[in-house]
Amino acid sequence: MSTMETLNQVFCVVFDDDDIQITPETTANDIDGWDSLSHINLIVAVEGKFGIRFQHGEILTFRNVGDLIRSIEAKL
């Protein structure tokens, strides 16, 4: 399974919506319920699923899902 496919599953769980289909261009504006609290839940879920840890400053640089994927893949 690709990083994108695994990450999409995490999004579906965190946002309780099996119809979510993320792309590298997806931003918080594209997903209902993606606010600051759910963003923290998403990051924690991503860290757990992939067995990685993000630095606080790194999280602040994510502009879209593509940035998140690049960071995940750099850590794997």
Image (tube, helix red, strand yellow):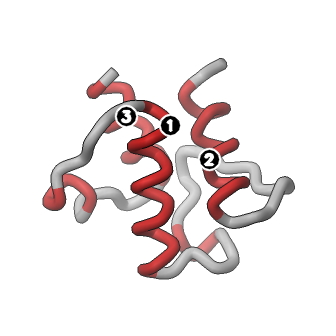
Identify which residue is drawn at 38% across, 31% down.
Answer: 51
Residue 53 image point, x, y percent: 26, 42
The three-letter amino acid code for the residue at tag 2 is: Val
How far apart, in angstroms, are the residues tagged by discs 1 and 3?
A: 11 Å
Residues at marks 2 and 1 touching, judged by CB atoms closer than 8 Å = yes
* Quarter of the image where the N terminus is located: top right
SS under mark 2: helix
Task: Identify residue for label 3.
Answer: 72
Q: Nearer the viewer, residue 42 or 31?
A: 42
Few, some or many residues within 10 Å of mark 2 (<14, 14–19, 20+): some
Few, some or many residues within 10 Å of mark 3 (<14, 14–19, 20+): some
Residue 29 image point, x, y percent: 57, 76
Q: Is residue 13 left or right of residue 48?
A: right
Which mark is nearer the camera, 1 or 3? Answer: 1
Answer with mark 3 or mark 2, whichever residue precedes in sequence: 2
The three-letter amino acid code for the residue at tag 1 is: Lys
Answer with mark 1 or mark 3, whichever residue precedes in sequence: 1
